[in-house]
Amino acid sequence: MSSVHPTPASPPARRLPFAGVLRLGRPSDIWFKPALSVVAAIAPPNLTLLALGRLDLAMYAMAGSLCALYTHNRPYAARAAALLWVVLGMLGGLAVALVAASLTGSAVVLVTVGALLAAAQKVLCDATRVGPPGNVVLTFVSSASLFVPQTLDRVPGHLALAAATGAWAWLVCMAPALLRPHGPERRATASALRAAAAYAETGGAGEGHARARAVGYAAVQAAWQSLLSTRAPSRTRRALERLVVRAEVALAAPADADAGRLRAWARSLRSTGPVPSAGLPPAADELLGVEPARPLWARLGPLTPLAARTALGCALAGYASLALGIGRPYWALVTAASLYQANIALTWSRAVQRVVGNVVGVLVFAAVVPLAHLGQAALVLCCVAFSFGAEALISRNYWLGSVCVTPMALLITEFAGPQEPGALITERVVDTVVGALVGFAAAVVVTNRRAGDRVEHALTAADRAREHAARLLAEPHPGAAALEAARRALAVALADLRATADAAAGEWWQRALPQERVVLAEQSGHRTLAATARRQGLLPDRGPDTETEDARP
């Protein structure tokens, strides 16, 4: 039983975070996969263009190669389809940009097109949950292409080159399936088990238990999304689903969970050996692989403020850069596009990280540019090295990855010919500051007043799910399948409630959030989850009195 005490309602305005914004975290478990993939996707096409003496086309080759950054957390069957859509989305944005650049030389019009593309890319990436790096790479490709001299007759050839390198990136990302066909699902399940073990070690009442529980439910939801992203049945997937159910049950009743056993299961998933057995009652097995359908349109509605912020912020950032006479307004536009997160507080943190990373990055560029100017081969190798460094470091903190992304982007501008380093550095710093300031100002102006409404809706959904589970528990012989469905639905509702409340807590200028009701709903919901799991035989039975007490709101 949780010991969290209700907290007062939040004030309508909140302070922006400073502490911890630049703190380095642990690297991702698979940091080397996108890092090596992007090297394998970038190097061969660029070295081929170098051999042909057409390095001026490298920007279009990079457009397709950068698709190798996506979908590394997805099972391979789902990755194949998702990565195909990423490549098609990149080609669509590139096509619009190239045609626009061919038809007009008006910088204002081109910035407007870039801003609208950025908003569409942001919404689609968030709604489809494509994962990192999200819309930023797609926006970089389309925005940079808007300001390269272009004619209509050359557009098909440039798109064909991008499509070819996109296909190569697809093959690079699918190749590991030959060695470890269930690797992504195993990693996601292991993460859920470790997070559940960390929460179990708090006993549901120790220091930091609320944060550990939220992290645990997020990891479990990520594991379900990974496992359910493909409908292809397999014995391995069913075994992994049983382990995720065990992690979910441990989060519902941490005092009854065996943290050591959970961690042992997680360790066993590192290899390619058999998945350990985690026997479940027959009813739980019946519903494995079942997930409530959530249509795309239902996820688009809450993203409306983000779309408006992105379109307005990117357009104003580009216009401001033009007003200052900067020759590459797309840098300011891309900076603004990279800022927008789930709420104002996270957007502010990203703005600080972006500025710090870019400023340090231009200093790195200044140190490396003499080496890059030794020849085109050195230029390509430097670009490849920075692409690896960016993906190796960005999971520790966004600003650290930006230290490598910035010199890589500056080096790409030199594929068409040598540039004056001082001018590049000055323009990049100015555009970064302009993009960050204007982009964040747009986020403040475009308020998200519906965040509180979504918390109310999430509260209602959680209460209904809890009441439904409690009614089943009150029956003398509830259906086993119905009880399992109710437990799963309640777990999802509570995870959604916490995510919605956290997102709303970082917004400005809205009515006070019902924090006390959220905490009470979580407390009663988790008690009911524990009672449901106990009734299913997933936990030790403590007797009918305990079960009734657990289910009580």
Image: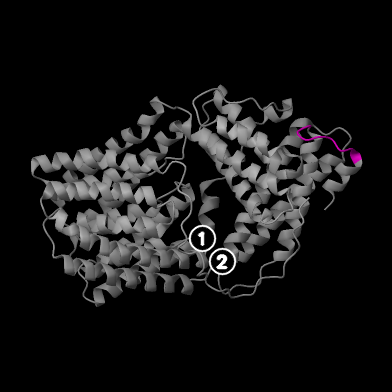
Please determine whether, in this image, residue 226 is positioned above or below residue 437. Answer: above
Left/right of residue 445 with respect to residue 539 in the rendered view:
left
Residue located farthest toward the bottom when viewing the structure as drawn? 323
Q: Is residue 100 visible?
A: no
What mark, if any, has residue 506 been given in the picture?
A: 2
Residue lying at 72% horizontally and 70% vertically, measured from the top left? 8
What mark, if any, has residue 503 been given in the picture?
A: none
- Rendered location of residue 242, percent (x, y): 64, 30
Q: Are marks 1 and 2 in contact (CB under 8 Å)?
A: yes
What mark, if any, has residue 342 been given in the picture?
A: 1
Q: Is residue 172 visible?
A: yes
Circle 2 packing at 10 Å, graded few (<14), some (14-19), many (20+), is: many
Question: Of the residues shown, which amino acid type is indicated by label 1?
Answer: Ala
- Rendered location of residue 534, percent (x, y): 80, 37
Q: Main secondary structure of the magenta part?
A: loop
The image quarter containing residue 161 is top left
The stretch in magenta equals: 537-544
Residue lying at 52% horizontally and 69% vertically, measured from the top left? 17
Left/right of residue 230 with respect to residue 1 in the rendered view:
left
Inter-mark Cα distance, 1 to 2: 8 Å
Residue located farthest toward the right when viewing the structure as drawn? 545
Local SS, label 2: loop
Residue lying at 73% horizontally and 50% vertically, measured from the top left? 204
